[in-house]
Amino acid sequence: MTDFHFIRPLWLFLFIPFALLIYLRLQRKMKLTQIEMHFPEHLRQALMVGEQGWAKHAPIVLLGVLGLLATMVAAGPTWQRQISPMGEDIAPLVVVLDVSSSMQQSDIAPSRLYRAKQKIYQLIDERDSGTTALIVYAGSAHLAMPLTRDKAIFKPLLDTIEPSVMPREGKFEQYSLAVIEQTLASESSKGSILLVTDAVSAGSIAPWKAYLQQSQQKLVIFGIGDPEGNAAMPMEKKSLEALADKTNGELVIFSQDDSDIEQLSRLISSQVTQNGDESEPWLDAGYGLIWLIIPVYLLWARRGWIVQWCVIMMVSSATLYSPTTTASDFAFIDLWMTKDQQGQRLYQQQDYEQAAKTFDDPQWKAFSYYQAGEYELSQEYFLRSDTLTAQLGVGAVLAHQKEYVAARRWYKNILKDHPDCETAVSNLALMENIISQIDQFSESQTNNTERQNSKELGDKPQTSEGAEQQIDQNQIIQETLSAEQILNNAALNEQWMKRVESNLAPFLVNKFYLQLEKGLGTLLYTNNKEIDLNKTKIKTIKSDTDNQLKKGGSL
């Protein structure tokens, strides 16, 4: 709306005669009122039936409103140019995909992430033109594919995207803003940002709002999940609605049919920027107002119609109104206590599971699930907050799931940024001791199991590093083939082609890990500046929180 203006501004001078007409009519009404005061009270009431109160001035007020609308139609309001059928869509689309562990929920089979990738590729494939980029995020955000017009390249790329390729666990959508800003830095046209996720944190709304206000990009949120489903981690529709409301964005909820793709396509296409738009005529948006003016003027001659139709419209609007909040979503206690206050009350009553379902705050959800023994859910919610408290919570949860090696690695990462954290130091020593004891036991059992077949751990946690096994280097056969041998021998050619790495996962893992090591995956956009949160001092957690984690997990 920054380009709002009038195509024919001289028509705005019509305001002057309309204002003069209304002034004269009001003066006439005032004179009639002065004359009426000379009549006796009983005669004045009999003569002025139906002319009492505000209804007496309603025709004049409505005449002014209609005059205003008619003047605006004649002046031709506009804020965008007409779309030429010969133009080319150059508006960029940046897809930001949530790859955190909550996207593995199966309330929409086979998983949210799987269906999200299907929908993204379908949307990209149906785009007629324009460039598209893909950004993925979990505990850090990374550019998986820069802006390109090549649609085919997204199919193998999306197939490779899994939580396992991300170098850091978590769910921090705000880290993607710095990557988006860098991706669109060289673009002259405004584009769309498609955020594909099942939830956002309350702390990320302010950075998104600041960036979108500065960049004038359009945000479209694609909510992945079943709002009516009974998943362990349901889609947080309220948080998505809050982000859309604060950023003037649009929210589209996943559907099993193609209606969501059609809606996304319409929203994205509305941001289309045409090549050579400076030469295109401005789009006159005043014609739509005519439909508001015509019925009123057609009924203007009917006496008393204004009051009657106002009553009808008020009654109709009241009967047709349908609030979004249903009775099943409302409880009497909601009048007096917020969800977090209700959750705190349940937490103090040691009803931890119900408290976790009641809390809105993700960190309190994590603490509640932790106390309830739901460690996987607790870990997921701890990973939604990038604070020292949450990081210690993740380490404790990993230890309770017997992921001792992962817990040790996690505590080491904490100590890199917070070397004075006593809780991390003591828990790291405990993990080292547990792993050492398991390794000693495993090594003592190695000689007794040499002749037994090995068994994969599968989904079992890695409790230790295990006993090392030496491989005889003489048993490794190395074979070097020349280009001529490969090209002239069909069997060797086929064998060599099978060795070519077709899986993009190792490449993405290395790429994302290196970006994270350089601090590029955790940059936060704020006021047109990028801040490395790894180098920013984070508030030290309170000692009572440390004690709570220690007490709850014996860590």
Image (cartoon, rainbow, N blue to C red):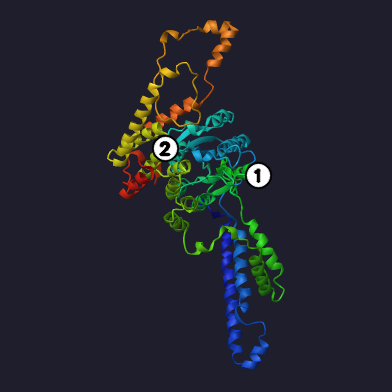
Mark 1 or 2: in front is 2
Indicate the quadrant containing the C terminus: top left, top right, bottom left or bottom right.
top left
Which image quarter: residue 327? bottom right
Three-letter amino acid code of the residue under disc 1? Ser
Which secondary structure, mark 2? helix
Instruction: Determine the residue positioned at 69% across, 76% down.
Output: 304
Vertical placement of 297 versus 161: above or below?
Answer: below
Q: In which image quadrant can residue 18 be found?
A: bottom right
Spot occupied by residue 277 in the image (x, y as percentages of width and height)? 56, 42
For the residue marked with disc 2, what is the amino acid?
Leu
Residues 176 and 22: in front is 176
Residue 459 on image: x %, y %: 50, 31
Instruction: State the residue in front, 541 or 474.
Output: 474
Question: Which badge, 1 or 2, comes first in the chain's sequence?
Answer: 1
From the viewer's perspective, is 519 left or right of 42?
left
Tag 1 secondary structure: helix
As drawn, which residue projects farthest toward the bottom? Answer: 40
- Tag 1 residue: 259
Q: Is residue 68 above or below residue 259?
A: below
How many marks overall? 2
**Is residue 508 or residue 401 the one in the foreground?**
401
The residue tagged 2 is 398
One can see residue 92 in this view: no
